[in-house]
Image (cartoon, grey):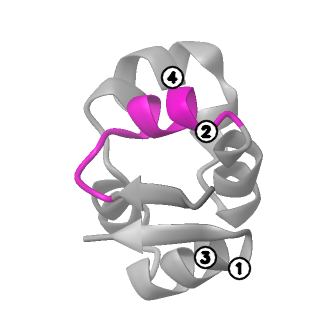
């Protein structure tokens, strides 16, 4: 089964669908994702592209790191 991530979905929705994504995103630099309060508040409106923009991270680098963990990225 292919694990597919739609970048238009919120971080909360993606981590609900794929709980293992929590660790991956935290390791990439989405540090607030490990905090359940942040995940349940900001994570409900934040997407991965928005998070990258806010934190000054390169989206392409983040996408490659996620794909390296076996996920397929949908734009």
Is 49 in the magenta?
A: no
Q: Which mark is residue 67?
A: 3
**Mark 2 neighbour density, 10 Å: few (under 14) some (14–19) many (20 or more):** some
10 Å neighbourhood of mark 4: few (<14), some, or many (≥20)? some
Magenta-drawn segment: 7-19
Tag 1 secondary structure: helix
Circle 4/circle 1 CB separation < 8 Å: no
Nearest to N terminus: mark 2 or mark 1: 2
Q: Quadrant of the C terminus?
A: bottom left
Q: Secondary structure at mark 4?
A: helix
Q: Earlier in the sequence, mark 2 or mark 3?
A: 2
Callout 3 crowding tier (Cα within 10 Å): few <14, some 14–19, many ≥20 = some
Image quarter of residue 74? bottom left
Q: Marks 4/1: CA distance?
A: 26 Å
Whole-angstrom CA distance, mark 2 to mark 4, is 17 Å
* Residue that label 1 marks: 68
53 relative position to 4: left or right: left
Asked if marks 2 and 3 touch (Cβ < 8 Å), the reply is no
- Camera-near label (3 vs 4) is 3
Q: Residue at x 31, y 67 (%)?
A: 53
x, y percent for residue 11: 42, 40
Left or right of 8 in this view: 25: right
Q: What's the residue at 29%, 44% (across, down)?
A: 9
Q: Position of residue 66 (x, y in %)?
A: 61, 69
Q: CA distance from mark 2 to mark 1?
A: 15 Å
Q: Nearer the viewer, residue 37 or 63?
A: 63
- Residue 53 against residue 67 in the figure, above or below: above
Q: Is residue 60 left or right of residue 33?
A: left
Instruction: Return the mark for residue 38.
Output: 4
Mark 2 vs 1: CB contact within 8 A: no
Q: Earlier in the sequence, mark 2 or mark 4?
A: 2
């Amino acid at each position: 089964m292919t694990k597919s991530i739609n970048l238009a979905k919120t971080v909360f929705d993606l981590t609900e669908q794929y709980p293992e994504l929590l660790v991956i995103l935290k390791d990439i630099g989405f540090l607030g994702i490990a905090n359940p309060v942040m995940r349940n508040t900001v994570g409900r409106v934040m997407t991965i592209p928005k998070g990258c923009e806010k934190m000054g991270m390169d989206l392409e680098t983040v996408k490659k790191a996620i794909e390296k963990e076996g996920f397929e990225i949908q734009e």
